[in-house]
Image (cartoon, rainbow, N blue to C red):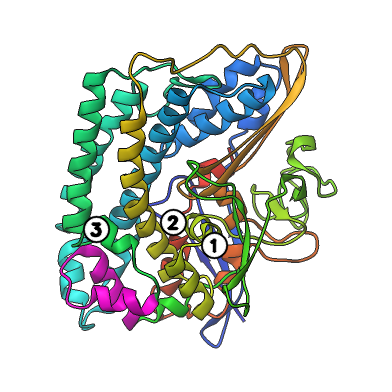
Amino acid sequence: MKRIQLGPFNRVEGDLEVGLDVEAGQVVAARVNSPLFRGFEQILVGRLAEDALAIVPRICGICSVAQSAAAATALADLAGITPPPNGVLAQRLILATENLADHLTHFYLFFMPDFARPAYAGRPWYDQTAVRFMAVKGQASGPALQARARFFHLVGLLAGRWPHTLAVQPGGSSKAMTAAERTRVLAVLREFRAFLEGALLGDRLENFAGLADGQALQAWAAGRSADFPLFLRAATDLALERTGRATDRFLSYGAYDLFASGIWQPDRAPDGGILDQLDPAKITEDTRHTWLAESPPCPPALGETVVNAEKAGAYTWCKAPRYAGEVVETGALARQLVAGNPLARDLVARHGGSVTARIVARMIELATVLPAMEQWVRAIVPGEAFCQPAPLPESGEGVGLIEAARGGLGHWLSVKRGRIERYQIIAPTTWNFSPRDRAGQPGPLEQALIGLPAGDGALPTVQHVVRSFDPCMVCTVH
């Protein structure tokens, strides 16, 4: 057996290393290491509860709004309040802007450059892919970055700035929208829609969103000149629809009042799967293989972050979250499966969770969430309240469960005598890049890498699988 250490990975927020045990050119075991500890959970202890709104966005420079939204939701739960309708719509718009921008960034800058590697030279799709996506030199990155930057004007209009906005509050949004600003927001959305329908999909968003199964997807992509259909040609040639299968159990907290919450797994039943109601009480964290103090698996509301850097058997700073003791995957694919999207469910019913299914799910979200954002903007009533006071109790607990681009993000806090007594965070990459637990169950990525080619002369299949989960390691080790 040969052991290979991959890392640090580039084009990743934070530090990531992957250890592979390889026999006969195939991965037989994998261990995912998040090697940088940052300690945000410890920083928060002892501070005023409201301080979380200023501190947790600094966990990450990519998904800072998601961290803000989770903290605001937890504080709203602590205060027992619900924002006014305008505030709810504004919060949705701010979070959706960041999430869709993340989907675009991931596709063009993090994921697709691996298909322009020289290892694929000679493939029928390679020349066109290299021209579009080769790192630094590709033609696609410049226009994609420009589209992303213009789209991010929304956060300025809706939240004042990005990253690290303070507009997202427990009581709604502190940044009201005027009628003139609403018109400007709609113009930005129209411009972003034009980029998605032109360069990315080569078709109207609604047409893509209406695709019902994998066969319809392939028929839609045939002969279509755009960047995502180009990916589908490469993915089909490389059989990526059969590559990167993990647990085939998926968790979503629900997003924007558009996608439902729940736990989904495929089945032979007529509807193609089993959907269970989400029960947050079934979420636990395991520290067996983490450089943290040993403790039995416990709910995050009771968890603590105590460092033990010399711990035997540990290999990462990432805890191992589990749902009812089981390994689950989260992300855009999980959201679409739980929400009942027929295309996502068909892809997983055929071959399980895969590289192709995860990328298709992100495209589904671009095609469905942007039209929803247009409706949310029109539903805002200028002049009515966007935020209400949120007086916090001296003692109590709160939970904030939201969906970031990469999946379910949860904040659990308890307050005692006006100060944070405990603050625990489970980020999407904590779920997907978790280590083994005390029962020996590997995390989702560790499972998804088994059986892949690796070693001298192997194609970069491991990289495709890792990047299909879109790791954000700084959120993982907060």
Q: 428 or 461, which lies in front?
A: 428
The dot on residue 18 is 1
On the rendered image, what quadrant is the C terminus found in?
Answer: top right
Q: In this view, does 68 lie to the left or right of 285?
A: left
Q: Mark 2 points at which residue?
A: 9
Region rendered in magenta: 214-237
Where disc 1 sits, the SS reads strand
The dot on residue 135 is 3
Q: Is residue 224 magenta-colored?
A: yes
On the rendered image, what quadrant is the N terminus found in?
Answer: bottom right
Circle 2 packing at 10 Å, graded few (<14), some (14-19), many (20+), is some
Residue 277: name its quadrant.
bottom right
Residue 179: name its quadrant.
top left
Q: Which amino acid does label 1 sit on?
A: Val
Q: Which of the two discs, 2 and 1, labels the residue nearer the N terminus?
A: 2
Q: Which of the two discs, 2 and 3, labels the residue nearer the N terminus?
A: 2
Tell me which secondary structure the magenta stretch mostly adopts: helix
Q: 268 or 243, which lies in front?
A: 268
* Direction right: furthest residue: 296
Q: Is residue 164 magenta-colored?
A: no
